[in-house]
Amino acid sequence: VYDFMLSYDRSALLLLSPDGKVTTYDLSRREFRDAYFVNMSAVQFFAHVDENTLAFYSRYENDRLTLYSKTKRKIVGRYLTTDPELMDRLSFSHPTPFFYEELDNGSMYLKMCDPINGHIYAIGPTGIRKDRKLSFNESSFDLSSVPQESSQDIQFLRKYLTEEDLCWPVYGIYETPNLFWFSVTKGQRMARTVILNKISGGYKLYDFPFEYFFDPVVSRQGNILYGCFRDPDYFLDYMQDESNCTTRQIEKLIDSSVVIFVKYNLEDFLE
């Protein structure tokens, strides 16, 4: 299983295999049911566009973004044509490019941040449109500028990102009507989280990327983010700064092997 997610109506679990097969597991009946087959050599990520349409991303296909209709059981669009030799320069994997924008009415709109140049696309059931571009000025990453000798050489690419002090990868992207935030690694050093206020134009920076706090993000309702800690060490560091609990109390909680859920209010970032 390369990726998984809940079905659009949250009644089933969708499991993605690397060859593009999506298997549906019914959560109430506890059995497998529908399966969808996308004719792709390798797939890394997928996401809902709407109730009927799925989006697939593959770094190994000439057309990296594919839209698939579940009712028609066929591909209805291919986008982001890229030279395979260019993709060879990206010698290690990257986070999922998909993220959702929460609209004023509470509905979710699928978007994608292209990992090779920072372009953001809005994705609909009938196609895509360029929405904006994440720019870090002289530190912006563009795969076309990476020397060709980096092909299949992880150490070369890491050295290039470090020496040029480039911002890559961008991950953990979320968007609401008022906020846009993401985590980014600059020069292969520790990542920082950037939170932009779309109304005022202001922003805040944090040394801890949200991915470490909330992995996976379980749910988001308005400006409330729910998630769980991936690594207890991050939880320990965080609680020592934010809580009146003693270190021993926190360590006892971690030793109990329970899943630690977090409720985080983003209202503070609207000021």
Image (cartoon, grey):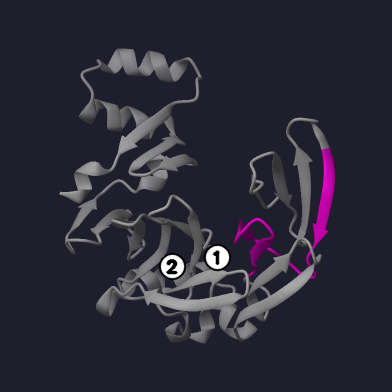
- Residue at the outermost front position: 105
In the depicted view, which residue is nearer to us: 187 or 253?
Answer: 253
Distance of mark 2 from mark 1, alpha carbons? 9 Å
> Is 225 or 172 nearer to us in this picture?
225
State the count of labels: 2
Left or right for 139, reference 154: left
Asked if one can make out residue 40 in the rendered structure from this viewpoint, the answer is no
Q: Is residue 16 left or right of residue 238?
A: right
Residue 103 in sight here: yes
Residue under label 1: 92
Q: Which residue is mark 2?
A: 158
Q: Are marks 2 and 1 in contact (CB under 8 Å)?
A: yes
In terms of secondary structure, where does tag 2 sit? helix
Q: Residue at x 58, y 78 (%)?
A: 87
The disc placed on residue 150 is none
**Picture coordinates of residue 157 (x, y %)?**
46, 72
Residue range in magenta is 32-58
- Residue in view at x 49 percent, y 25 percent: 259
Residue 262 picture location, percent across and down: 38, 31
Q: Amino acid at mark 1?
A: Phe
> Mark 1 falls on what kind of element?
loop
Q: Give the side of residue 56 with respect to residue 167, left or right.
A: right
Query: Above or below — where is 73 with respect to 146?
Result: above
Q: In this view of the protein, which residue sits in the foreground, 69 or 85?
A: 69
Front position among marks 2 and 1? 1
Splitting the image into 4 quarters, where does residue 160 fall? bottom left
